[in-house]
Image (cartoon, helix red, strand yellow):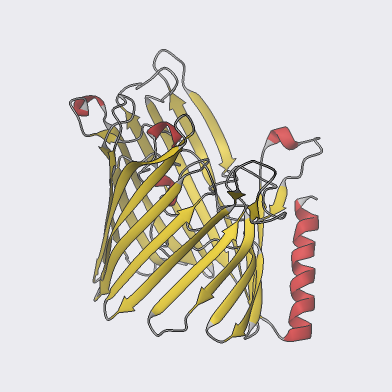
Amino acid sequence: MNFKQALCIFLTSITAGSGAFSLTTQARAILSGNLAEGTKQEGEDAKYEFFKLNSKAQKDDDGIVIDFSEGSFGGRLALWYEVNSSLQGSSGSNVSFRRSNIWFKPLDSLKITLGYTGCDQLYKERIDEWKVGNPFNLNERDWSKHPGYINYSDVDEMGLGFESRAIEGLVLTGGIARRWGSPGNFGKSFWNKSGDADSTYDAWGLTARYYYNKLCFQAGYRDNGSQSWKVCRAALGYEDNGIYAFAQSCLGIDYKSESDEYELSGICMDLYGEYKVDAWTFIAHLPLTFRLTDEDEDPDYFEYVLEAKYNTGKIANMDSFSPYIKIGSMNHDGDNKYAFIRLNDQLKDSVNFDITPGAEFNIGPCTIDIGYELLIHSKLYTDANNCNKVEWKIPVKAEIKF
């Protein structure tokens, strides 16, 4: 299936559905990437790339998303694209439907979801989950185990979910899905037992949010299945008069196959604050991770992002023109396992600095964000981690809602 065919399916489905059921539809299209980027490692020549689109299956936003609803039922169609020259002439598809689902409400207070069941309402709406501390081993900080802000399912994992609002101020969500990294498990049975083998089960989880005046209490538990990792979270948030802040703890419980036991692997404290006054917006994001191991390559560490943005209003055809500057230690896309600052005697050798001046603005229904990002890393921490000494990018993101 190519991009044109997938787009035709989208439009045909929505047109037919809207005519038959008078559906309410909302759609958005996103395109993000780098106009140019350059990297230089010690002892090597600089390397450059131009007009590179983001297309990481586990991280980047879906290119086209259409939400539709009609009172007691609805759904989402999400089209993700991959732009990779290696796909040219191959039999593989460069587009796929993911994070797609349908839902219905047997009761006004109960919503049942079939398909992608991920929940992104546990303080994920203001942060990038790929740029935060990981309570598990630092060397596992990649797509296979990065559960700091996921709920009960993950990208491309399908299952069954529910959301209950039976009690005023209380929102309960839950679901089951295929275990991360084990495609094909889900679909036979949630709970399996074969002969004398131990019982196994797939991923499941529960979350709860309770709103009381200006406060929000949140808790979540994610179980990635038998003999796999678990995550517990608890958080408190506050929002009022231009202030938005939360403090969230994330506990990682890992399975050790050699001892057939579970153990607390680490604790991440995620701190976030946002303050708006007049045309200014100030943001601070400070994940702090404590590791409960004695391994030299698995240290305690923290990261930070500080941002200041000023809305200048309308300039020419650009509305809400907002120049900004961000500084921090967080790697651009979270791939660098060592984009952190150590909390030990090697603090002086662990400088990772990221500065991005840029601007956001609207042109009609289109929102554009463009900047210049410079990353500087102090040293290579291990031979396996081929860290760039200096890296720069011109990131750009355009989103259209219609």
- 41 vs 96, nearest the viewer: 96
Is residue 325 in view from this perspective? yes
Find residue 189 and report its image quarter. Answer: bottom right
Q: Residue 56 placed where, x, y %?
A: 58, 43
Depicted 34 relative to depicted 9: above or below:
above
Q: Position of residue 138 (x, y in %)?
A: 38, 34
| Residue 307 in view here | no
Outermost residue on the top side: it is 43
Q: Quadrant of residue 55?
A: top right
Q: Residue at x 31, y 47 (%)?
A: 268
The quadrant of the image that shows the C terminus is bottom right
Residue extending farthest to the left is: 345
Q: Is residue 95 above or below residue 160?
A: above
> Which residue is at a point 24% across and 72% down the rendered structure image?
278
Q: On the picture, is 315 further left or further right than 160? A: left
Residue 125 location (% of width, % of height): 42, 62
Residue at image point 50% right, 63% down? 119
Name the side, left or right, on which 112 lies relative to 5: left
Q: Position of residue 156 (x, y in %)?
A: 63, 52
Seen from the viewer's position, the closer of residues 249 and 64 is 249
**Is residue 173 or residue 122 the one in the foreground?**
173
Residue shown at the point (63%, 60%) measured from the top left? 159
Number of on-image labels: 0
Task: Tell which of 216 and 242 is nearer to you.
Answer: 216
